[in-house]
């Protein structure tokens, strides 16, 4: 059974930084495309960043230049480094795995990020 567990969220002031982690188990992590999504109150879930199995990254326009997605295939862990945080970054952040065998999409439980002005 594949599991994704996010951590690292919290309350931070505008301009601050946080680093999120997503530890996975039950899958060959290095073969999966991984992503971070977020969902603010009353808003649709949106892509924050994606990283392929060979390290190619894609970012949402609102986070380009401020956020960095990375992965450690030896630790089966996905990261999201967030700098210059803004109040509009406030959301629940979700780790997503696209399973390399059947393309199934799996989600973590989410971690809350709150940025105060």
Image (spheres, rainbow, N blue to C red):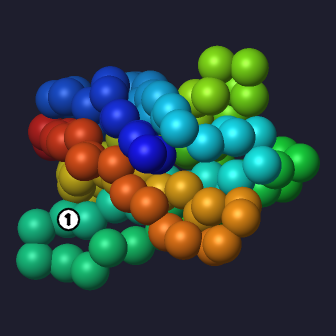
Residue 62 seen: no
Residue for point 58% across, 29% down: 77
Residue 26 seen: yes
Q: Position of residue 21 (x, y in %)?
A: 45, 29
Q: Position of residue 10 (x, y in %)?
A: 20, 28
Residue closest to the far right: 54
Camera-side residue: 4 or 50?
4
Quarter of the image that includes the N terminus: top left
Which of the 4 image quadrants contains residue 115? top left
Camera-side residue: 102 or 8?
102
Q: Position of residue 20 (x, y in %)?
A: 42, 31
Residue for point 19% across, 42% down: 112
Residue for point 63% across, 73% down: 103
Camera-side residue: 102 or 83?
102
The 10 Å Cα crowd at callout 1, few under 14, some 14 to 19, many 20 or more, is some
Residue closest to the far front: 1
Q: Vertically, is 103 above or below 52?
A: below
Q: Vertically, is 80 above or below 47?
A: above
Q: Position of residue 116 (x, y in %)?
A: 14, 39
At mark 1, the secondary structure is loop
Q: Disc 1 designates what residue?
A: 40
Q: Is residue 105 left or right of residue 33?
A: left
Quarter of the image that includes the C terminus: top left
Residue for point 26% across, 47% down: 110
Which of the 4 image quadrants contains residue 71? top right
* Count of residue discs: 1
Q: Is residue 29 left or right of residue 20?
A: right
């Amino acid at each position: 059974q594949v599991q994704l567990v996010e951590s690292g969220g919290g309350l931070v002031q505008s301009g601050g930084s946080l680093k999120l982690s997503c530890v996975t188990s039950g899958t060959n992590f290095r073969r999966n495309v991984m992503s971070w999504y977020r969902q603010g109150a009353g808003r649709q879930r949106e892509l924050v960043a994606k990283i392929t199995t060979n390290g190619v990254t894609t970012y949402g326009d609102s986070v380009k230049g401020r956020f960095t997605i990375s992965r450690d295939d030896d630790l089966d862990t996905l990261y999201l480094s967030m700098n210059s945080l803004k109040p509009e970054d406030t959301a629940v952040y979700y780790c997503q795995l696209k399973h390399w065998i059947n393309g199934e999409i799996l989600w973590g439980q989410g971690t809350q990020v709150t940025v105060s002005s």
